[in-house]
Amino acid sequence: MASTLASLLEPIQLGPLTLRNRVFMSALTRNRSVPTNVPNVVNLEYYRQRAKSAGLIITEGTLISQQGTEWPHAPGIWNKEHVAGWKKITEAVHAEGSFIFAQLWHLGRVSHPDAPEQKASGLPVYAPSAIAARGGKFRFLPGNPGYVTPTAIDDPTVLLDAFEKAAINAKEAGFDGVELHGANGYLIQQFLDSTSNLRTDNWGGSVENRSRFGLEALKRLIKVFGNDRVGIKLNPAGGYNDMGMPLDETIETYSYFISEAEKLGIVYIDLVRYLDSLDPVIEGKKRATQHDILATYTPLIKKAQVFANGGFSPEEAAAVVKSGQVSGIFFGMAWITHPDLAKRLKYGKPLDNKPDFGTLYGKYYAPEEEQRHGYVDYPEADY
């Protein structure tokens, strides 16, 4: 093991869980739950491979309800069939000595009314306000349509109920905890951001009101799992899916939200730093609110573990952990292309598998066996 990476290989306590290292696997949308959002044997193989060395695995975004979906074949956790599929995966992960949290996900306004599961729900696309996100391209729908104007939901507690039910299902499926997806322009961030939330009731307007939905969602998850098994992912810089407030408002909003989440006693906060790849050009300019995410927000976090995310190299990740600014790092693409990532770092093996971007998200309507390509066929190193 290279001494420069030693800090990443040290164990860490996460609530009641002792994680064997700090090389965590981020939530990674892969669209392989063919054909109807139910985790299958190919998903099982994918997670088992990575559980052999990962300290902690976060599932790909897992849809909390049929209403509020987008991509075909992203996994769900709203019915018993989903629970049964995930239970096989959690058992396999535990057998390999790792732990797994379900990332609970609702897309809000960036769903499309013609997406198959959304359409089957018989419900409209819900969001805090009737404001369409700019951009977007639904390649699996004829004509590649963009985002549409959503329906402002009258009673947001309906969506909170869906988060709570998803947490109940996740617990039944054997997950060690849950992560609330508060990043990337999805429902939680839509409530937080003043450009997508123009409500004048107690779910919008002030920083406190815009923060209410995300904080209430955390309370629902805590009700099911306890606060020492609940985390959240945030990307205050925004950008992706047309997110972003002025800098002063961004800092005020996220400082308040993070401080209040801390008071709930959640076990970790995962902060995504600015990434150019998540910052689209909209109407001729970049969308994100660029600022130093870790320097701005980590001083506010006193009790929860602070994790970071966003294109870290192993060497950079180890340095940030060693500095004490964060306690662990979530890797994304490196885990996709190297099922033995943490083991490679431990034994000094190169990260030499190149990503096949053509198979990154699978084939939308291919049979299960074809979904293996670019998913479970990346080789491990020789040891």
Image (tube, grey):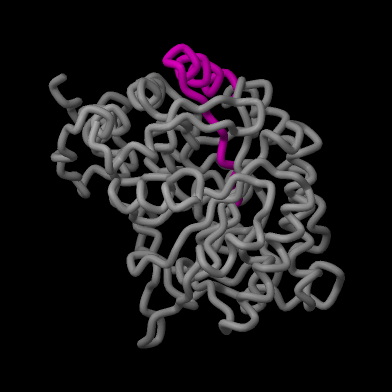
From the top left corner, tell me how far across and down residue 316 is, in percent: 32, 53
**Residue sitting at x 26%, y 34%:** 345
From the top left corner, tell me how far across and down residue 13 is, in percent: 58, 31
Q: Nearer the viewer, residue 359 or 141?
A: 359
From the top left corner, tell me how far across and down residue 175 is, in percent: 60, 25
Report if residue 192 lies within the magenta region.
no
Is 378 on the left or on the right of 246, as rendered?
left
Q: Quadrant of residue 187?
A: bottom right
Is 356 on the left or on the right of 226, as rendered?
left
From the top left corner, tell me how far across and down residue 288 is, in percent: 46, 75
Residue 308 vs 377, above or below: the answer is: below
Residue 50 vs 67, above or below: the answer is: above
Position of the N terminus by quadrant:
top left
- Residue at the farthest right position: 202
Position of the C terminus by quadrant:
top left
- Residue at the farthest bottom position: 284
**Residue sitting at x 57%, y 73%:** 132
Can residue 119 be seen here? The reply is no
Q: Nearer the viewer, residue 60 or 118?
A: 60
Is 366 on the left or on the right of 222, as rendered?
left
**Residue sitting at x 43%, y 46%:** 329
Q: Magenta region: which residues?
A: 83-106
Can residue 139 be seen here? The reply is yes
**Residue sitting at x 47%, y 71%:** 292
